[in-house]
Image: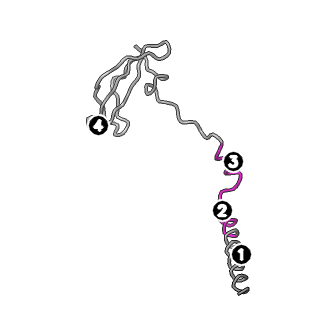
Amino acid sequence: MIWTVVGTVGVVGLVIAAGILVDRRFGVLPRARELRDAGKPGLKLPPHAPGEAAETALAAPPRIVRCHACRRPTQLQGEDRATYGARELVIQRYRCPRCDAITTVYCTS
């Protein structure tokens, strides 16, 4: 009976030792430095392209607006007006006839 307990403890010890050796060799578990660095803020998102956000509004609407998905020319669907800060903006929505994606362009009035 005692040898069963000792054998079980021995097998568990061997499995733990093998796991530690594998982790040190191949890096299965994350290290403390990696866990600390994961909590830090990463790179910022790329800024909006000109006209894609209110902060980057264009002075005049572009002649041709291409779809972001398939790069085909789009058709104007409608426009709205909005105030951002002290500026009056024209928000134009374009729809792609091929893939039905919507592209929004912000312009100053």
SS at badge 4 = loop
Q: Quadrant of residue 101?
A: top left
Residue at image point 29% right, 34% down: 96
Q: Which residue is mark 4?
A: 100
SS at badge 1 = helix
| Position of residue 75 measured from the top left corner of the image (x, y, whole percent) | 28, 28
Whether residue 25 appears in magenta in the rendering, the answer is yes
Residue at image point 38% right, 36% down: 68
| Position of residue 29 measured from the top left corner of the image (x, y, whole percent) | 65, 60
- The reply to whether callout 3 and callout 2 are in contact (CB within 8 Å) is no
Q: Where is the N terminus found, in terms of image quarters?
A: bottom right
Label ID, residue 27: 2
- The reply to whether callout 2 and callout 4 are in contact (CB within 8 Å) is no
- Spatial distance from mark 3 to mark 2, Cα to Cα? 16 Å
Q: Amino acid at mark 2?
A: Gly
- Spatial distance from mark 3 to mark 4, Cα to Cα? 44 Å
Magenta residues, start to end = 21-39
Crowd rating for badge 4 (residues with CA inside 10 Å; few <14, some 14–19, many 20+) = few
Q: Which residue occupies the foreground of this view, 14 or 61?
A: 14
Q: Which residue occupies the foreground of this view, 57 or 31?
A: 31
Q: Answer with mark 4 or mark 1, whichever residue precedes in sequence.
A: 1
Q: Amino acid at mark 4?
A: Asp
Label ID, residue 33: none
Circle nearer the viewer, 1 or 2:
1
Q: Is residue 25 left or right of residue 51?
A: right
Label ID, residue 36: 3
| Position of residue 18 measured from the top left corner of the image (x, y, whole percent) | 68, 73
Circle nearer the viewer, 3 or 4:
3
Q: Answer with mark 3 or mark 2, whichever residue precedes in sequence.
A: 2
Label ID, residue 13: 1
